[in-house]
Image (cartoon, rainbow, N blue to C red):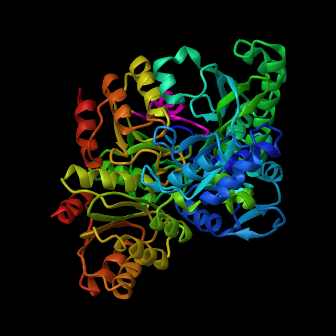
């Protein structure tokens, strides 16, 4: 789950990480008022969950309340990577002396949390990794041992070469680590982490991603969930307990198991078709889930046929068959259904379908060839 | 030989009294797995499918001599279950649970290693040594005894591939689902090493997917260390970037973890990658004949 910059900054404040002051607004008049409150020298920042705001013109410096209103109007009418801007953060401008990068994330190869820091802040870290990898410093941290202030200090000292700056940076990293662990984050980034002209280090931006698996432990954060992150179909699928991702094609997919679902999409493409979606109906599936899955798939007008591919382990083929028939009836599905059933209770499943005039393939490649037709 | 589990393995089921725990206990018993006990706190004295239930793992081991556990416990309690098993000294822990927070798994990985246990999973279908023992949820009847080792990040995709192998007469020594999460207890490399040393295994099928760099690490390992043939299938060629495709670990992020990169790594290591699961048996057969 992604957080907006302003939500991230609220968390930073909670954890004692200095940020520049800001007020969230959703209309230009409020931006004018906010600008006055913040000393008339502000930055209007689009609040969207996609990157590249600056390049898209979603970040503008306003040195008067009137300009704040004007730029707010412009930014609130924008779309950044097709996402309409609904909120902006009016944030106090800061006189910057240096820009750094600090972040924490989980390194899958090391199987540790990793602290990443760079003296080259304010640029895209992934681009930096390609162009100037030597400017990126990393320190693995074992969460069971916790964070060692001395190690962090030694690690950061080449980047923050004044004691006063180093002390602030270490404290911020220690606080970031606490924030990371206590909230089950996948990523926290401060980019840029700036040194002001009065030698204060503050977070000028915030990027936080929370581990979806950890959300059940943080209902207050889960409540912040921003619908922008997912399409309406994807949101509905989540409510139904289905894994679903929109795609561009015309063949709807209903599969049990994520790996098999991805492979099914791949094979459809291989045979010249194009998948309309990824959908994992999961294990232990009830006929209700199948109906919900059909509902979401058929909501997409592009879908010309549906391929159902079930390899029953936990999932029972008879449950799926019942679900398919119910769905077809309840939703008045007219488009062709190509079904492949194999595994637990497959004989029963095939029988149920046969009685309703539907046959089920045993072999996946044949089923895909059929649906691509 | 097979790896990790065999006819002698004595298995505990943590969460045996739950819906999934109970259902799969019956299924594993049907496969002649030696399930010697179950663990659900507070339910000592109960019997599930004639298997005695204990309050703690330690108690269960002391009464039954168990040397393996399979965990069917909801995500919010799984870390405790894994650590309890590791603390009690079990050498093999299989965790089926999906949804364990990743930070907890980073910690569990270290915790379990420090106690000398092998953790398989989480978010996996488990392990099966055909004809000997099933510690998992896979359908036993699609497996056939043989000499092919299978390692996979997936559940049902594994069954698809195993089914194809069995149909073509290529039985399996051991199949392991390592799990779909970003951090799992045992990866491709550890198991490839075990298969290379296993007398019963003659060839290996490696089933990967988008996300992370485990396949790339496996490719490097195979090139440097393995003589036995390995064939691979990677799912997710059509997956869009930045989206989690079901499995928590199946995500292309920051341009990394694409199917293309994994396929490339395997090809550079001379490990063939098939386009469709049903191509695996013929390819394996031809590699085994050489």
Give the left or right position of residue B36, taking residue B248 as reference.
right
Which residue is the extreme one toward the left?
A373
Q: Is residue B228 above or below residue B102?
A: above
Q: Position of residue B170 (x, y in %)?
A: 31, 44
Quick one: A348 or A243, which is closer to the camera?
A: A243
- Residue A79 is inside the magenta segment: no
Q: Identify the image quadrant of the C terminus of chain A.
A: bottom left
- Residue B196 is inside the magenta segment: yes
Which residue sits at x=83%, y=52%? B59
Which residue sits at x=70%, y=28%? A95
Which residue sits at x=41%, y=22%? B226
Give the left or right position of residue B55, taking residue A284 as reference.
right
Quick one: A200 or A354, which is closer to the camera?
A: A200
Q: Position of residue B24 (x, y in %)?
A: 58, 63
Image: magenta residue range:
B183-201
Whether residue A146 is visible, yes or no, is: no
Q: Position of residue A86 (x, y in %)?
A: 56, 59
Q: Is residue A318 above or below residue A221?
A: below
Which residue sits at x=28%, y=53%? B167
Quick one: B113 or B166, which is closer to the camera?
A: B113
Give the left or right position of residue A266, taking residue A13 as reference.
left
Q: Position of residue B6 (x, y in %)?
A: 55, 44
Q: How many marks?
A: 0
């Amino acid at each position: 789950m992604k957080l907006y910059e302003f939500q991230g900054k609220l968390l930073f404040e909670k954890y004692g990480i200095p940020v520049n002051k800001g007020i969230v607004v959703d209309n230009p008049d409020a931006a004018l008022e906010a600008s006055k409150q913040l000393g008339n020298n502000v930055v209007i920042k689009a609040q969207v969950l996609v990157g590249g705001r600056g390049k898209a013109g979603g970040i503008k410096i306003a040195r008067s309340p009137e300009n704040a209103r004007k730029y707010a109007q412009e930014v609130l009418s924008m779309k950044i990577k097709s996402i309409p801007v609904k909120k902006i953060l009016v944030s106090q401008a800061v006189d910057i002396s240096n820009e750094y990068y600090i972040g924490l994330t989980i390194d899958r190869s090391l199987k540790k949390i990793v602290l990443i820091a760079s003296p080259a802040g304010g640029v895209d870290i992934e681009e930096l990794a390609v162009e100037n990898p030597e400017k990126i410093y990393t320190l693995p941290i074992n969460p069971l041992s916790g964070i060692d202030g001395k190690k962090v200090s030694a690690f950061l000292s080449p980047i923050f070469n004044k004691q006063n700056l180093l002390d602030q940076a270490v404290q911020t990293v220690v606080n970031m680590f606490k924030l990371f662990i206590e909230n089950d984050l996948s990523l926290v980034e401060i980019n840029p982490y700036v040194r002001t002209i009065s030698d204060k280090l503050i977070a000028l931006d915030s990027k936080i991603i929370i581990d979806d698996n950890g959300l059940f432990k943080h209902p207050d954060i889960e409540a912040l969930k921003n619908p922008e992150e997912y399409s309406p179909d994807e949101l509905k699928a989540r409510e139904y307990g289905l894994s679903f991702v929109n795609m561009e094609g015309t063949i709807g997919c209903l599969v049990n198991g994520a790996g098999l679902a991805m492979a099914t999409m791949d094979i459809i493409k291989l045979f010249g078709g194009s998948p309309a979606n990824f959908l994992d109906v999961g294990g232990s599936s009830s006929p209700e889930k199948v109906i919900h899955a059909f509902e979401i798939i058929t909501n997409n007008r592009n879908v010309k046929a549906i391929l159902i591919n079930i390899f029953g382990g936990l999932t029972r083929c008879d449950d799926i068959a019942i679900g398919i028939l119910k769905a077809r009836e309840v939703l008045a599905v007219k488009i062709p259904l190509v079904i492949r059933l194999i595994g637990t209770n497959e004989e029963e499943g095939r029988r149920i379908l046969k009685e309703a005039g539907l046959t089920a393939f045993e072999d996946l490649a044949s089923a895909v060839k059929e649906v691509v037709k | 030989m097979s790896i990790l589990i065999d006819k002698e393995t004595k298995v505990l089921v943590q969460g045996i009294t739950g819906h999934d725990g109970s259902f799969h206990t019956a299924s594993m018993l049907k496969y002649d797995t030696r399930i010697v006990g179950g663990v659900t706190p507070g339910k000592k004295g109960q019997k599930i499918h004639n298997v005695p239930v204990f309050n703690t793992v330690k108690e269960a081991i002391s009464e039954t001599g168990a040397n393996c556990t399979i965990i069917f416990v909801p995500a919010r309690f799984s870390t405790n279950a894994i650590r309890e098993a590791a603390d009690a000294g079990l050498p093999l822990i299989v965790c089926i649970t999906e949804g364990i927070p990743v930070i907890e798994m980073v910690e569990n990985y270290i915790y379990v290693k420090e106690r000398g246990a092998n953790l398989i999973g989480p978010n996996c279908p488990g392990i099966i040594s055909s004809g000997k023992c099933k510690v998992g949820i896979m359908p036993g009847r699609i497996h056939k005894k043989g000499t092919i080792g299978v390692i996979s990040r997936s559940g049902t995709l594994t069954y698809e591939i195993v089914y194809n192998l069995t149909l073509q007469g290529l039985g399996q020594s051991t199949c392991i689902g390592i799990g779909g999460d970003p951090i799992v207890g045992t990866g491709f490399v550890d198991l490839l090493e075990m298969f290379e040393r296993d007398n019963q295994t003659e060839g290996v099928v490696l089933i990967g997917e988008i996300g992370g760099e485990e396949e790339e690490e496996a490719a490097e390992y195979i090139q440097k260390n393995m003589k036995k043939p390995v064939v691979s299938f990677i799912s997710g060629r059509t997956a869009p970037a930045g989206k989690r495709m079901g499995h928590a670990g199946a995500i292309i992020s920051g341009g990394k973890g694409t199917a293309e990169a994994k396929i490339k790594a395997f090809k550079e290591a001379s490990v063939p990658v098939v386009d469709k699961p049903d191509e695996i048996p013929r390819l394996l057969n031809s590699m085994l004949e050489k």
